[in-house]
Image (cartoon, helix red, strand yellow):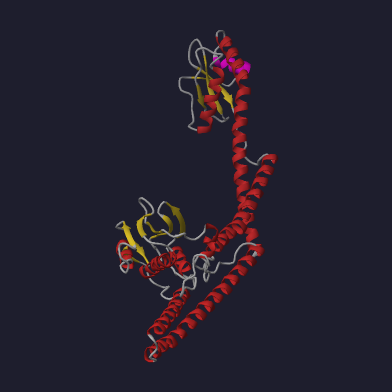
Amino acid sequence: MASLAAVKYGLAGLGVALLTTAQLQLLLAERLQRDRIAQQGPEVLFQLRLAELALDRLPPGKLARLSGLPLRVGENPPTTAERQLEGQARLLRQQLCPAISPCPVVLPAAAERRGVWVEVLAPLDPVWLLVPIPPVRPWPPDPWLLLAGLGLGASSALLLFFWWEVQRPLRQQQQALARVGRDQWPDPQRERGTAVVRQLIGRFNAMVQRLQAGERERAVMLAGIAHDLKSPLTRLRLRLSLAGLAEADLQQAEADLASLERITSQFLLFAGGGDHEPPVAVPLDQLLAEQAAALDERTLSLSLEPLERRVQPVALARAVANLIDNACQYGAPPLRLELCAAEPEGEGFRITLWDRGEGIPEAQWHQALMPFQRLDAARGGRGHSGLGLAIAARVARAHGGGLERLEGPRGFGIALWGRSCRIRSQVDGS
């Protein structure tokens, strides 16, 4: 496995080295060609001046034999369409134009020797001077360029190795780790990368499995205890109704049984009752109005914007009912329930419940959201197990949102915000 990865990144680095060396060599060859043309300019200019002076006294053929200049007489010398040679002809013409007037014509030559034709000013027929321009060999490359290419290839291979075998698996591992504890469990991560990274991913998968097992055991234990208590409580209520107790004693016993049943119900909800509820599109204003129907307008006023969102209706109704119940128990009327869109053009929603009570102190807010936490200053009622806000916060997170503590002119408020569910999520995180 390691040898295969080494070969893979070695080949990638070698490819980068060869490509870089080839590009550098082409740039160097172009630069050398420009320098060569610049050096040839004065020499070609001297040959043109010499040929122009000699052609006043000698014919082109005799001048070519005496001087050795490669001259050709005629209107149209043989030319080629080689693009590199055309570029070199333009460069040479740029060198000659400032010194000769009128500027001579320079054409790529199709001859035995690679070069260009330069027009010579002659008194009679057109005369062309062949200027040889040998090609620059692009290969083998310069040793220093090859060394630079190999260095860049090795650096690229190392960067690719660290990105693909270390950085990328660690980033995916970080994203999976961020999902732990947010009411969802990440899928088992594929073990890849270096040996240390694979070992880290394996231990992370084992940790998630242990946490899931512990969560399941806790949920089963809570559900089992709460379920087992329901039958004795029902029988006890029946026996109390037949015991012939005094009215005051019977009411007190009924209140105690109601408190026990409420605690049992909260345990069942927190343990995951109905946690696989599929999201459906519902009008949230009607859903909240149903939850507030048991209270009169003097106790709870409504300000509900018509909104339709894709939510888990039973879970969301449960969360809102818990907030209303907590406000009735620990707050002070009048209560006000508000619904509005959390985003102007998005799919978010925001549910806010205000009351006139003292509320939960900011320093104790995070503690209040934890399961089985009862704040003595604000939660001294009967039949409460400290799960109301924990359940509401869990439902909000399942909808991609959360609970927010508010203070304002209207008193103390709790805002539950979220978004439309796009995938099925689990309320209890198991």
- Residue at the limit of the structure toward the top, as seen here: 57
- In the rendered view of the protein, which quadrant contains the N terminus? bottom right
Q: In this rendering, is residue 28 above or below 325?
A: above
Is 63 magenta? The answer is: yes
Is 413 magenta? The answer is: no
Q: In this rendering, is residue 222 above or below 118?
A: below
Image coords of residue 387 (percent x, y): 48, 71
Image coords of residue 174 (percent x, y): 57, 60
Image coords of residue 365 (percent x, y): 52, 61
Q: Magenta region's main secondary structure?
A: helix
Could you say which quadrant of the image residue 239 lies in?
A: bottom left
Q: Nearer the viewer, residue 176 or 322?
A: 322
Q: In this rendering, is residue 80 above or below 375?
A: above
Q: Which residues are magenta?
A: 60-67
Please tell me which residue is depicted at 55% across the width and 15% down the height of the picture.
98
Please tell me which residue is depicted at 46% across the width and 74% down the height of the picture.
382
Q: Nearer the viewer, residue 28 or 345?
A: 345
